């Protein structure tokens, strides 16, 4: 442990129980070298280490005075072994090749200053004024030993330094090494001094005259690389990113100081991109102050931009090296060329011409490129001055591949689409695409290992926060029912496996056995919530599963339940009539190009149809959008352009015009949306990747119900038909004890004056205590500690805890302010870290599902297909989580007239009148 008496420890903390690693309390920089070096950092001693910019002025002056006092202090005499000068002289005359120089002592003192934080390094002098100064006991001991010429040495145990292959240790002392080429005995400095001797570095040691040239070159290269390593380590310590994060374990893991997110790879560079909001794979930090974000953004934008930017000549042999240029900026380099020309027409047969051009002096054929780091959100290295012809040619090649392979146009929205292009460009001309065998063999195996590693990291958190098993059943194009299992935890969602359940879908007992295999794989103790849709057989099997284990809950998918509410609302007569008329407007516009272009002109771009992952959500979102376009549509159908067109005299045009100009149509639309908007707001909440929804769903349903009543001016009788639909789905399908407990344990809701402490909520909380904590004594502790939470006592009542109730996610709040009550903290975290909904695969995955029923046809091909499905879904999940905050359920930018939209949930809004079912 550090010495308490040293003043430096009042301003720094020891890192990892290692007193040589000190973290500054003001700028959070970590210093290696002990408390003495740390105090120089506080005092901003020039030439020693970068000074602290955040240290208070009075602290800086205090440390400066302290260091000045230490410098003036007289050396403290320590007990030491005496050195007999005669012995040294005899030894020197007996072995002329023995080396002991004054420079060696200076190096030793510097080493000891770094190794012993606040110890006083004494300068020990002999009484003889002619005797050279000896500064440490270790050096004195070294000089006092009598050497024997004929003694054979060896390398120390477990020595890995390459220098030991060229020297022998004397008397098992690392500080006395004999060169095997010239027999010189080197005292002090250890193996490093021997390598300097072999490399021919003058100053501290005489060079070896007998060493072979290849050994000398090897030692010079080794010492040079070590210097670079030290420089890299020093640069790492002085990086501004460490002021806002810390290393998290081994490797390149870092932890953000502002949001506590652990970043698994990329080191401090990725941490800074997270803080600056640049990296597409890492969600930006939401808690970082604006000034810090701007400072890091400026730092990254200037990174890699030297005072004099040198042009790099790019030839065909140098282009492949571009792939290493994004090493530290994790793909945020934008290659802005000063002068660059693209050889679009040069092929493999033009090598002679290329050589002639390369030999010539600077000419138009010589390509010069300046690499400039700019803060861009995309990862690619853009060669922005490529000719338009070459870009068009590349675009056409990509398009041909998409058309030939029959890929959906939405494949261009993949996160990995642009990454693929960037990697190909970085590899340079001549890159060969992976073969059929590579894609289904080695590359697939590597992707499985990579995805499995990410899933393994997620599994580590299950024991602490628990997890939710999500069951998604959907039919492929052939009519087979495919059941997919996903596992959700607060750190992310992973795909576990898929199963063709066509033969067992009608048997709850068979489904029970299938569900049980997943429970055994995940671990019953890790599961808190088992989520399925409301299909009767799924619901029956899940309830039997809960009865079998009695340690977790079943709940219906909240997204599906909200969609059921919207479906039942759509069956009400006046709502159904409005949808028929609204779809008639949309169908007419989208099936006549002239009318469609006129609509685009009037509304200023955009579309009427808004996509969603479910059919009924799409209906209400599109109706809401149509309501927003009421005025532009009025102008369109009353304009001279429309009146003079032939469409205005056709039956279809007349019917649509009458609907648009009918005030009653818009009045009923407005009434329907007063009911639908609160429910759509719940979908937005459920789709958020930023926080778990368990602590909010109960309150969201209550608020939606109240909003509907208020929209009708608190005349509940007028909206009773709509409320009946909401209440029915909530009470019969959606409500779960977990929802009630999450409502109670959410501090932003519980401490709100509007909190409703109902019997239903209390019962749900007690059911959760009884189910999730089976030990009676532990149950008593939970109920006892719950009183502190209810009364905001102890750590729950601290000013910081009160202030953070509404700003922090509920689980984060409990992890910070409930440490005094670990049992209650664990209970709350396991509930608040769960989800209420099932991951939706989306229709773009249907082609993947079509082949799942072939898994059992052939063992080898079945395993390959299993691996492919595993990689596919986990890549989709990673892409979704890296784009946290997207409103996937509510919004989609696809063209509503594309084939995928027509095959999806918006088909009856754009199909020609009379063709929809």
Image (cartoon, rainbow, N blue to C red):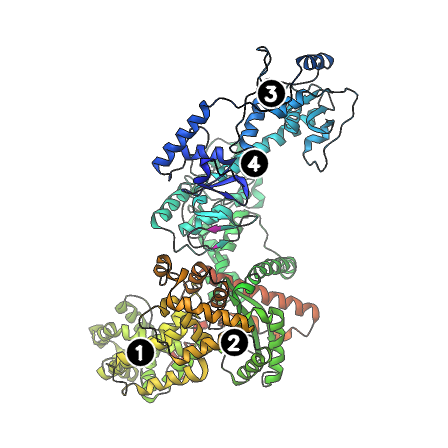
SS at badge 3: loop
Residue 127, visible in the rendered structure: yes
SS at badge 2: helix
Q: Can you identify the residue that label 2 sits on?
A: 770
Whichever of callouts 1 and 4 sits on the residue coming sooner in the sequence is 4
For residue 915, above or below residue 518: below
Classed neighbour count for the residue bearing mark 1: other residues with Cα under 10 Å, few (<14), some (14–19), many (≥20): some
Q: Can you identify the residue that label 4 sits on?
A: 229
Q: Can you identify the residue that label 1 sits on?
A: 706
Tell me the tag on residue 204. Answer: 3
Asked whether disc 2 touches disc 3, contact meaning CB atoms under 8 Å apart, the reply is no
Residue at 70% across, 36% down: 159
Q: Nearer the viewer, residue 442 or 22?
A: 22
Whichever of callouts 2 and 3 sits on the residue coming sooner in the sequence is 3
Residue 311 in percent (x, y) is at 45, 35
The Cα–Cα distance between marks 2 and 4, rounded to whole angstroms, is 57 Å
Prevailing secondary structure class for the magenta stretch in the rendered image: loop
Whichever of callouts 1 and 2 sits on the residue coming sooner in the sequence is 1
Whichever of callouts 3 and 1 sits on the residue coming sooner in the sequence is 3
Whichever of callouts 4 and 3 sits on the residue coming sooner in the sequence is 3
Residue 387 in percent (x, y) is at 43, 47
The Cα–Cα distance between marks 1 and 2, rounded to whole angstroms, is 31 Å
Residue 370 in percent (x, y) is at 44, 39
Image depth: mark 1 or mark 4 in front: 1
Q: Nearer the viewer, residue 903 or 401?
A: 903
Q: Horizontally, is 616 left or right of 190 in the view?
A: left
Classed neighbour count for the residue bearing mark 3: other residues with Cα under 10 Å, few (<14), some (14–19), many (≥20): some
């Amino acid at each position: 442990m550090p010495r308490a008496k040293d003043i430096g420890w009042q301003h720094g903390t020891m890192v990892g129980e290692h007193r040589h690693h000190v973290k500054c309390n003001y700028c959070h920089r970590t210093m290696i070298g002990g408390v003495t070096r740390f105090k120089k950092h506080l005092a901003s001693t020039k030439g020693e280490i970068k000074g602290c910019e955040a240290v208070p002025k009075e602290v800086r002056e205090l440390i400066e005075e302290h260091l000045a006092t230490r410098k003036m202090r007289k050396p403290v005499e320590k007990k030491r072994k005496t050195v007999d000068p005669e012995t040294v002289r005899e030894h020197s005359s007996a072995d002329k090749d023995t080396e002991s120089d004054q420079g060696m002592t200076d190096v030793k003192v510097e080493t000891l200053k770094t190794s012993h934080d606040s110890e006083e390094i004494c300068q020990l002098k002999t009484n003889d004024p002619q005797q050279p100064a000896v500064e440490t006991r270790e050096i004195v001991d070294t000089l006092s030993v009598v050497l024997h010429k004929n003694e054979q040495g060896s390398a120390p145990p477990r020595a890995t330094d390459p220098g030991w292959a060229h020297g022998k240790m004397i008397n098992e002392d690392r500080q006395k090494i004999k060169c095997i080429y010239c027999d010189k005995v080197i005292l002090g400095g250890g193996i490093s001094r021997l390598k300097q001797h072999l490399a021919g570095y003058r100053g501290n040691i005489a060079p070896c005259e007998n060493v072979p040239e290849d050994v000398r070159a090897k030692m010079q290269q080794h010492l040079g690389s070590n210097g670079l390593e030290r420089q890299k380590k020093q640069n790492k310590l002085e990086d501004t990113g460490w002021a806002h994060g810390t290393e998290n374990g081994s490797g390149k893991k870092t932890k953000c100081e502002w949001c506590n997110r652990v970043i698994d790879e990329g080191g401090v560079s990725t941490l800074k991109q997270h803080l600056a909001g640049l990296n597409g794979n890492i969600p930006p930090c939401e808690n970082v102050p604006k000034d810090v974000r701007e400072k890091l953004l400026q730092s990254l934008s200037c990174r890699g931009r030297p005072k004099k930017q040198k042009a790099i000549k790019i030839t065909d042999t140098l282009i492949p090296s571009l792939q290493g240029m994004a090493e530290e900026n994790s793909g945020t380099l934008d290659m802005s060329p000063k002068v660059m020309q693209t050889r679009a027409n040069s092929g493999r047969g033009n090598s002679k011409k290329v050589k002639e051009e390369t030999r010539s002096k600077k000419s138009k054929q010589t390509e010069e490129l300046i690499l400039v780091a700019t803060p861009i959100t995309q990862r690619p290295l853009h060669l922005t001055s490529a000719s338009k012809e070459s870009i068009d040619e590349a675009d056409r090649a990509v398009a041909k591949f998409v058309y030939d392979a029959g890929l959906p146009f939405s494949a261009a929205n993949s996160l990995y689409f642009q990454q693929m292009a960037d990697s190909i460009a970085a590899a340079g001309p001549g890159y060969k695409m992976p073969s059929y065998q590579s894609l289904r063999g080695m590359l697939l195996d590597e992707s499985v290992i990579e995805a499995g590693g990410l899933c393994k990291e997620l599994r580590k958190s299950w024991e602490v926060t628990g997890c939710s098993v999500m069951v998604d059943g959907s039919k492929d194009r052939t009519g087979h029912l495919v059941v997919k299992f996903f596992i959700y935890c607060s750190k992310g969602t992973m795909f576990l496996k898929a199963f063709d359940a066509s033969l067992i879908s009608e048997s709850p007992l068979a489904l029970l056995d299938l569900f049980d295999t997943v429970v055994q794989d995940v671990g019953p103790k890790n599961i808190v919530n088992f989520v399925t849709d409301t299909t009767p057989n799924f619901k029956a099997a899940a309830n039997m599963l809960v009865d079998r284990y009695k340690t977790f809950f079943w709940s219906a998918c909240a997204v599906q339940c909200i969609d059921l509410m919207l479906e039942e609302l759509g069956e009400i007569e006046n709502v159904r009539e409005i949808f028929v008329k609204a779809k008639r407007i949309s169908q007419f516009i989208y099936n006549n190009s002239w009318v469609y272009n006129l609509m685009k002109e009037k509304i200023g771009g955009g579309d009427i149809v808004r996509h969603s992952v479910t059919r009924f959500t799409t209906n209400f979102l599109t109706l809401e959008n149509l309501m927003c376009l009421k005025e532009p549509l009025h102008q369109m159908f009353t304009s001279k352009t429309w009146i003079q067109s032939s469409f205005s005299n056709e039956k279809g045009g007349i019917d649509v015009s009458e609907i648009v100009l009918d005030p009653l149509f818009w009045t009923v639309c407005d009434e329907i949306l007063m009911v639908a908007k609160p429910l759509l707001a719940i979908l937005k909440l459920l789709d958020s990747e930023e926080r778990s929804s368990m602590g909010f769903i109960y309150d969201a349903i209550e608020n939606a119900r109240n909003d509907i009543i208020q929209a009708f001016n608190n005349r509940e009788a007028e909206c009773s038909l709509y409320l009946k639909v909401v209440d029915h789905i909530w009470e019969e399908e959606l409500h779960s004890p977990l929802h009630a407990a999450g409502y109670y344990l959410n501090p932003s809701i519980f401490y709100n004056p509007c909190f409703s402490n109902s019997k239903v909520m209390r019962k749900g909380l007690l059911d959760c205590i009884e189910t999730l904590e089976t030990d009676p004594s532990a149950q008593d502790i939970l109920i006892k500690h719950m009183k502190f939470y209810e009364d905001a006592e102890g750590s729950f009542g601290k000013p910081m805890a009160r202030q953070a109730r509404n700003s922090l996610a509920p689980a984060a709040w409990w992890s910070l302010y409930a440490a005094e009550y670990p049992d209650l903290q664990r209970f709350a975290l396991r509930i608040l870290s769960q989800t209420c909904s099932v991951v939706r695969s989306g229709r773009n995955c249907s082609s993947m599902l079509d082949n799942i029923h072939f898994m059992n046809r052939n063992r080898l091909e079945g395993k390959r297909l299993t691996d492919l499905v595993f990689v596919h879904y986990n890549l989709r999940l990673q892409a979704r989580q890296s784009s946290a905050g997207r409103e996937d359920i509510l919004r989609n930018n696809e063209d509503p007239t594309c084939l995928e939209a027509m095959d999806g949930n918006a088909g009856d809004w754009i199909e020609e009148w009379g063709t929809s079912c």
